[in-house]
Image (cartoon, rainbow, N blue to C red):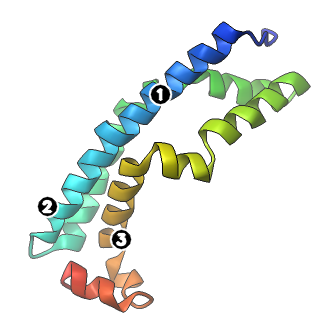
Amino acid sequence: MEAITITDEYLTELRERFEKWADFLNMGFGLVAFTFALACLGTKTPVVNAWFSIAVLSFVRYKGSHLFPAEILRLRKLAKVDEKARVLLKGLESEFLSVKTAVTTYPIFLIGYVLLGAIAFSPVLSKVIPGLGTYVGI
């Protein structure tokens, strides 16, 4: 594997790739998940329809996987043998893939996916969150 050379151009390219990934997660995935979740609530079987929606979203996610920065995948392999790659990977994961980043950078994705997931798992979750069953209509 090729050695890592960290330059301003390299970091700028990574930031641009993560911006494209964030756009896909928010607008391509999160917005669709949110729309599906609301649509499921308007049906007689929201739980079943939420599972169908998750199946469709899995395909959307698969089709958008090429937008995830391939450099992260390369660094994950390289980090097993290269300390410089390991440090760079930890920094990139901290900046672009942390929980804080998910909340601040991918909010539409989180809202849509969590809502759809809550509907899909509502028969189980309603035991812990009683109001959820009423919201979903089960």
Residue type pointed to by label 1: Glu
Residue 4 falls left or right of residue 99: right
N-terminal of the pair, mark 3 or mark 2, is 2
Q: Report, in whole angstroms, how far the alpha carbon at label 3 lies from the one at label 2.
A: 14 Å
Q: CA distance from mark 2 to mark 1?
A: 28 Å
- At a point 27% along the width and 46% down the height, the residue shown is 31
Whether the residues at callouts 3 and 1 have beta carbons within 8 Å, the answer is: no
In the picture, the disc for residue 19 is: 1
Q: Secondary structure at mark 1?
A: helix
Residue 48 image label = none
Please identify the quadrant where the C terminus is shown: bottom left
Residue corresponding to mark 2: 39
Residue 123, quarter of the rendered image: bottom left
Question: Which residue shows up at 40% across the image and 83% down it?
Answer: 124
Q: Residues within 10 Å of mark 3 (few under 14, many from 20)?
A: many
Where, quadrant-wise, is the N terminus in this rendering? top right
Q: Which residue type carries mark 3?
A: Ala
Marker disc for residue 118: 3
User: Residue 82 lies in what quarter of the image?
Assistant: top right
Q: Determine the image quadrant of residue 54.
A: bottom left
SS label for mark 2: helix
Disc 2 versus disc 1: nearer the observer: 1
Q: Position of residue 79 (x, y in %)?
A: 81, 29
Question: Going by the image, does 59 lie left or right of 101?
Answer: left
Residue in front for this viewpoint, 26 or 51: 26
SS of the residue under disc 3:
helix
- Amino acid identity at mark 2: Ala
Residue 9, image x and y in percent?
Answer: 64, 8
Q: Position of residue 125 (x, y in %)?
A: 40, 82
Mark nearer the N terminus (2 vs 1): 1
